[in-house]
């Protein structure tokens, strides 16, 4: 779910979007040498085998019990599109590249970008202590804005609290205020000292959204509209009001088999064998999550977009279209390993996944993956409308991983072994 996106990032990276020459992965990055090796020239890319790619999407969508899925891949060799299934269970309405979907934690890239624009304007610095803007944050004098951006503040993620997850199960229409979310996170002890380790926390990004409002004197929705959507002409991308549970048409419904409390906690992401057997027997159907109130994600995950516009956005994100050169370099320089293996990397509201820069997003009913490779001009966008999978995995990210060998040249034996090893780890 959205609360587990940090783990999903680690999975994607450690499973090896090791496109160094390229193959599979899950939500993380490769070494710099591997990236440069894979991106030396356009020879890193291969022509699309669309029939084989269609077969992979069909097989995986069925394996993950999806209702609908969209895949968009653009390279100098052309464009691959697969609009699989339907937007609504029981109908034959296929999704399109303009179908709207909740994008979950991809919203974090919006929040990170507007904060960096304010850095560029001299309104704030990544080295400023959080206490300068939020005196209520414990130990805030030792936590920097940069540490909120790159998930190294040590602040506990409110999405890991029993209180939030119970409420999501019992009252999915509840309207949450961002200050409530921050209070939930701050009521728990920190996970680590500031700057000592990576810990994906939604509390960080909600705080950044509140600080952005404080600095710009506008609601966060208006900040996104003025600074991002209008600038890139993203007319199908939006950030709804906290009381608005609708998705503008045309949209896809969202579905989930998983409860929030039952899958809360390390090692509990997968449903029980009994539940999975009942699902496969048809005696359990997925819950429709389309109009669950997403306000519990706020500036960490409340956005809506389409595959087409996610592709436009993630390219702008990776090349720094909305930042000046120095600020974009600041962002890219912030990307550092987020685990002991060095395979995962995260920076100022941006993840590195092999040669791709972007993010993933997940909340009940929706999973999306977006990435852009600036060296080879490759764009990946995948979304699915049943999430998480019954084993707790992220379907869109998994499909993206399996399509990498159809975009990038075959990896070296060493890279292949690493991908296989990391893929095994990702299943744990």
Image (cartoon, grey):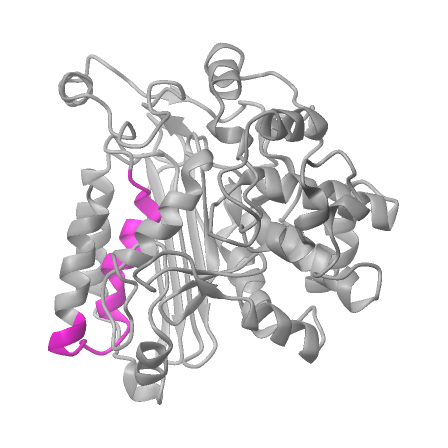
Can residue 97 be seen in the rendering of this structure?
no
Can residue 391 be seen in the rendering of this structure?
yes
Looking at the image, which residue is at 21% across and 70% down?
49
Quarter in which the N terminus is drawn: top left
| Predominant SS of the magenta segment | helix
Q: Is residue 63 above or below residue 316?
A: above
- Report x, y in % for residue 318: 54, 69
Q: Is residue 308 above or below residue 328?
A: above
- Report x, y in % for residue 14: 28, 57
- Report x, y in % for residue 399: 28, 52
Q: Quadrant of residue 27?
A: bottom left
Looking at the image, which residue is at 47% across and 55% down?
359
Looking at the image, which residue is at 69% across and 23% down?
243
- Report x, y in % for residue 209: 71, 43
Q: Give the residues in magenta.
A: 393-415
Q: Is residue 46 above or below residue 178?
A: below
**258 or 236: nearer the eye?**
258
**138 or 311: nearer the eye?**
138
Q: Quadrant of residue 187?
A: top right
**Residue farthest along the right direction in this orientation:** 217
Looking at the image, which residue is at 28% across and 50% down?
398
Q: Is residue 329 above or below residue 222?
A: below
């Amino acid at each position: 779910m959205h609360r587990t996106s940090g783990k999903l990032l680690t999975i994607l990276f450690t499973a090896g979007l090791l496109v160094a020459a390229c193959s599979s992965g899950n939500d993380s990055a490769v070494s710099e040498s591997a990236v440069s090796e894979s991106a030396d020239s356009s020879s890193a890319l291969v022509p699309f085998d669309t029939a084989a790619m269609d077969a992979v999407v069909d097989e995986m969508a069925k394996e993950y019990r999806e209702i609908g899925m969209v895949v968009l891949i653009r390279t100098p060799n052309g464009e691959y599109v697969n609009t699989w299934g339907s937007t609504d269970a029981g109908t034959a309405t296929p999704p399109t590249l303009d179908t709207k979907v909740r994008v979950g934690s991809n919203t974090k890239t919006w929040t990170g970008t507007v904060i960096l624009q304010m850095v560029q304007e001299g309104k704030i610095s990544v080295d400023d202590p959080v206490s300068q803007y939020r005196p209520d944050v414990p130990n805030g004098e030792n936590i920097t804005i940069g540490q909120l951006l790159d998930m190294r503040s040590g602040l506990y993620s409110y999405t890991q609290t029993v209180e939030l997850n119970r409420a999501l199960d019992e009252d999915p229409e509840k309207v949450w205020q961002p200050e409530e979310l921050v209070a939930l996170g701050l009521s728990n002890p920190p996970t680590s000292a500031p700057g000592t380790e990576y810990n994906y926390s939604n509390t960080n990004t909600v705080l950044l959204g509140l600080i952005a409002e404080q600095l710009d004197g506008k609601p966060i929705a208006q900040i996104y509209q003025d600074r991002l959507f209008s600038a890139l002409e993203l007319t199908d991308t939006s950030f709804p009001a906290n009381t608005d549970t609708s998705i503008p048409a045309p949209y896809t419904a969202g579905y989930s088999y998983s409860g929030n409390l039952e899958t809360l906690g390390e090692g509990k992401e997968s449903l029980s064998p009994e539940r999975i057997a009942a699902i496969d027997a048809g005696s359990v159907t997925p819950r429709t999550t389309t109009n669950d109130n997403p306000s519990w994600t706020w500036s960490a995950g409340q956005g809506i977009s389409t595959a087409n516009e996610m592709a436009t956005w993630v390219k702008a994100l990776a090349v720094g279209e909305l930042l000046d050169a120095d600020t974009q370099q600041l962002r890219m320089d912030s990307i550092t390993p987020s685990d002991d293996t060095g395979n995962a990397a995260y920076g100022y509201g941006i993840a590195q996944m092999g040669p791709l820069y972007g993010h993933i997003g997940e909340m009940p009913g929706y999973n999306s993956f977006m990435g852009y490779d600036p060296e080879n001009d490759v764009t990946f966008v995948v979304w699915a409308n049943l999430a998480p999978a019954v084993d707790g995995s992220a379907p869109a990210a998994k499909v993206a991983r399996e399509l990498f060998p159809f975009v990038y040249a075959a990896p070296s034996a060493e890279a292949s072994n690493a991908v296989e090893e990391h893929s095994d780890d990702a299943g744990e």
